[in-house]
Image: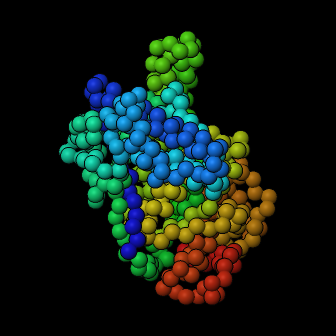
Amino acid sequence: MTTHRKVYRYRIEPTSVQESKLCMLAGSRRFVFNWALARRREHYAETGKTLGYNAQAGELTALKNQQETSWLKESDSQLLQQALKDVERAFVNFFEKRARFPRFKSRKTDSPRFRIPQRVQIEGSRVYIPKVGWVKLRKSQDIDGATKSATFKREADGHWYVSLVSEFEMPDVPLPPIPESEVVGIDLGLKDFYVLSDGGRKKAPRFARRGQRKLRRAARRHSKCTKGSNRKAKAKRKLARVHRQIANQRKDFVHKATSGLVRQYQGFCIENLSIKGMAKTKLSKSVLDAALGEFRRQLTYKAQWHRKWLAVIDRWFPSSKLCGDCGSINTNLTLSDREWTCECGAIHDRDLNAARNIKREGLSQIVVAGHAETLNARGEGVRPATAGSPQ
């Protein structure tokens, strides 16, 4: 059995008194994080050794008993312990070269947030937060399984959200063989969000382009306000809400697209696109607005949860330039060529031809992984030689 995680994110609606308590808990978490970071740096400067989590947990108990910091007792104990674990994880990431050296949290720049691993309960449309009480919750869907931890955060738009983590297990058994007709190749793009090998298409919504006028207007109002004024803070929240609306529209679109594909097909073949590289070109705004990386992320875990096949082909595979009939490669194909004619006389729609080539290449990986047919050259890669095979 393999353990997987699901994260549920809901918006909470605290009262003014409850919101002040949430901000107090977030401030306690930030204070303990900065204190633990300063103690580690001081201890290393004196002894040349690292101060571990267990030692700092004992020091935290003594810190709460001091008169000047006795206000920490008003916060949840697990919340403060999680702040120590955050410092521990930050140093681990630094030593393993996954992140830079940990820095102190600023009250002005750090978003108010804290995490409580236990004692957070969901009952109907409300959530129980230790030291705060029952808070109104916008529950959009039910939670499967027991929750393992809860993270509370106030976003830039001024709203508070809670992220709940639940775990579930799946059996470690091979995927069942599927017929070729239930496998689809997916070619992602900017004009069409995706084109399927069976001819299906979905237009790119371009939410950022459509909301560009609102963004410019909100950004202009924010820039004209006096720095540090209440009007500038209010304008900043309005600007963040416009960004949040566009992000929610994009996320909802991708969720519906991936869920529809998972319900319809049993196997998927996609490309390993370099989103970071594409975001550095002159089409960066359109690339980031299309959310191609988010599409792959969602399709990956949804295919795993629903026990569907997923084949990812090499990013250097010439899916658009390869003729699906004769197997020749058109080296003169440019990005503006939406249709092209091969030397064999075949006329290709660029995206549809790429989706069909992606499917052929991906089928070779599905065969190796345990497809019903076993003509797989003993694990050797099958490349454009499969071009021209029946769909």
Q: Residue drawn 33% across and 40% down? A: 76
Residue 384 visible: yes
Asked whether, in this view, residue 334 is left or right of residue 68, the answer is: right
Residue 252 visible: no
**Quarter of the figure that contains the N terminus:** bottom left
Front position in the image: 320 or 168: 168
165, above or below 314, in the image: above
* Residue 151 percent location from the top left of the image: 38, 44
Numbered-mark total: 0
**Quarter of the figure that contains the C terminus:** bottom right
Front position in the image: 231 or 72: 72
Q: Residue drawn 57% across and 81% down? A: 368
170, above or below 260, in the image: below
Q: Residue drawn 66% across and 70% down? A: 324
Front position in the image: 172 or 109: 109
Q: Residue drawn 65% across and 50% down? A: 48
**Residue 104 figure quarter:** top right
* Residue 319 percent location from the top left of the image: 67, 64
